[in-house]
Image (cartoon, helix red, strand yellow):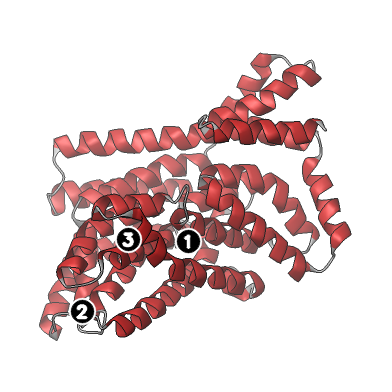
Amino acid sequence: MADIILFVVLLILIFINVPIAIALAMAATTFFVIQSEMPIVAIFQRMFNSIDSFPLLAVPFFLLAGKLMESGGISRRLIHLAEVMLGRVRGGLALVSIISCAFFAALSGSAAATTAAVGAIMIPAMVKKGYDKSFSTAIQAAGGTIGVIIPPSVPLVLFGVTASVSISDLFLAGIIPGIFVTFALLVLVYIVSILQGYGGGEKYDFKEFFLALKDSILALMMPVIILGGIYSGFFTATEAALVAVVYGLIVGVFIYREITLKDLYHIFSSATVMSASILFIIAGASVFAYYLTRERIPMQITEALLSVTDNWIFALLIINFILLIVGTFMETAAAILILTPILAPVATALGIDLVHFGIIMIVNLAIGYITPPVGLNLFVANKIAGTKLEGVMRAIIPFILVMIICVLIISFVPALSLFLVK
């Protein structure tokens, strides 16, 4: 009964718009105070210890690197390269939007940053070429989800820390699923473009392609340096995040010269606020996770699920459904920190590799970025486009359905996630 009351209290706090970090900590702390002799100071010590982690340093650094890439002219160069590559194809600008999101995802690690950086350029360009504004907005919101699947990915870092799984393995595992989701979105966009009669863009010759490639080569080298350094063992994922920041500063300030001292202030302050909010959620979730562990709730859920079925396929369908619902109503970082301690033991009991399970969880929760009421990508893209949310919500439905299909395929074809790892 106490456990049920705990979750009810948490849902009430979330429903009345109490910040998720405070809601998590308050709900668990209340029951610690009532049910045990644990001093309050021990709770605060646990909150601090949860963020006193070397791997978690990757989170603020990757967020800062994404901000530097967004402001340093890198997104514009990547978009131009994609346009030269695909501009002449039917629905070319729509395809360019998705490809550009995939390029930028390999730099930012953030869904919202990917949506904002690419959308600010592509949504006006698409509308100018005659694309429906709601469709253009939906494309950008859906394309932004690739930002948390293709490495480096902040949610993958959070899962790795919470589940004690190698972040390098998770990054490696995210490459093929990220490409797979990108390809699925490209197919959908191409089909819709044909049905709606959206034409191709400007034709470019090889010389223009070479110039665009030359102009964007420094941007394209960044994921090669980061991921190559991690997988070669030259540096860890956390050290790679710092390398990304230094690289972004050098390219944006000294080579492209598109970042000024005033820009740096806004970039650093924005990244600081984003990092603080995520770390605050981690601290609050650590108290909640400690309560779950102390009360053996993950074990109880595992036993309950296995009593219903020991078929891993059916159990994985149930887990996917839970993740889909939670992702719709809860911010991704909070969902990872709350659900990982609960569902990871279930996955282990079912014989599911935790690296594979991490990819399943992240791709599933990525759908939450394009579904109301949370739908961060949806609101970011809608703010850029300045259109009615109702129209965007109708246009986003096919993208949600395609991503659900992708989640199911990734779930039941482990090789997509584990091939490169193994």
Q: Name the secondary structure under disc 1.
A: loop
Is there any visible trace of residue 216 in the rendered image? no
Marker disc for residue 87? 2
101 or 72: which is nearer to us?
A: 101
236 or 335: which is nearer to us?
A: 335
Marker disc for residue 133? none
The amino acid at mark 1 is: Ile
- What x and y, as percent, mark residue 296? 81, 39
Query: Looking at the image, is 369 positioned above or below residue 277?
Result: below
For the residues marked 3 and 1, what is the alpha-carbon distance in whole angstroms? 12 Å
Crowding at mark 1 (Cα within 10 Å: few <14, some 14-19, many 20+): many
Residue at 46% x, 46% y is: 238
Query: Looking at the image, is 319 positioned above or below residue 81?
Result: above
Q: Quick one: label 3 or label 1, which is nearer the N terminus?
A: 3
The amino acid at mark 2 is: Gly
Say which quarter of the image contains residue 89.
bottom left
For the residues marked 1 and 2, what is the alpha-carbon distance in whole angstroms? 25 Å
Q: Is residue 169 left or right of residue 251?
A: right
Residue at 69% x, 59% y is: 319
The residue tagged 1 is: 149
Nearer to us of marks 2 and 3 is 2
The residue tagged 3 is: 104
- What x and y, as percent, mark residue 245? 32, 46
337 or 401: which is nearer to us?
A: 401
Total residue callouts: 3
Nearer to us of marks 1 and 2 is 2
- What x and y, as percent, mark residue 348? 76, 57
Residue at 38% x, 66% y is: 395
Is there any visible trace of residue 193 in the rendered image? yes
The reply to whether the C-beta atoms of the residues labelled 2 and 3 are less than 8 Å apart is no
The amino acid at mark 3 is: Phe
